[in-house]
Image: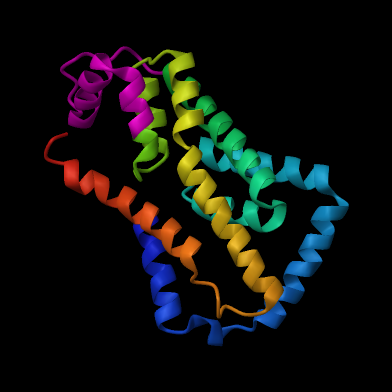
Amino acid sequence: MIIFLLSGLILFFILNGSKYFSLENLGSTYKHIDVYVRSNYIFSSIGFTVIYITTVFFSIPVKPLLKMIAGLLFGLWLGFIICLISATIGAMLAFLFIKYSWGEVSSKSKYKVVSKFKSLVESNPIAILFVSRLLPIPFFVPNILAGILKIKNSIFFFTTLIGIVPVTFIYVWFGTHVKKAIIEGSVDNFIDTKFILAISILGIMALVPILFRKKL
């Protein structure tokens, strides 16, 4: 998901994608939405939270987009908090559903990924689950595997809550960066030092699984 997003952003600017839509029209649409959100702040926040939790629970792959929308609509800090709490609750619900509806798993499971994850988690559950949240793997994978392996609820909760902080913050910040470009009506200064730093961090995180695939 991160690789696709990075590729899309890079192609967008290389191909001068801004010429294919009007920032003026986009800005006008955003202002109408922003007025509604500000007028119905609590309802909008709760509604967005419910949507986010639902997408996480049902493993719908739109979370990066939702994070950026949160930054666009609610700003950096409130958007970050909403996404962090929503993602954690959604993951916890999915984890608990799997945990209490799935039978016991033997160490010789026919699914190689399950048996491998089981051996890693048994040796150091906190570290493995925490790292799995930092790596750009599908968000639902740790939810399902941790549920199947009956990980302690507290370990899953805190490793998820803390582990998703970096990526969540970066994506929400992207949303605020887009908001700034829309308000200014220009993408001339869109690629600045902060943008390059954020892209670089996501790029490095996307490469980690490739570098350590043989070891794992």
Image spot of residue 122 (x, y percent) = 26, 14
Q: Which residue lies furthest to the front in this view?
A: 193
The range drawn in magenta is 102-131
Q: Can residue 58 be seen in this view?
A: no
Magenta region, mostly helix, strand or loop?
A: helix
Please tell me which residue is depicted at 49% across the width and 61% down the height of the picture.
Answer: 194
Quadrant in the picture for the C terminus: top left
Image spot of residue 174 (x, y percent) = 54, 59
| Left-right relation of 85 to 122 | right
Please tell me which residue is depicted at 67% across the width and 40% down the height of the picture.
Answer: 49
Please tell me which residue is depicted at 24% across the width and 26% down the height of the picture.
Answer: 117
| Left-right relation of 16 to 71 | left
| Left-right relation of 176 to 101 | right
User: Residue 188: within the magenta?
Assistant: no
Q: Can residue 70 be seen in this view?
A: yes
Image spot of residue 146 (x, y percent) = 37, 23
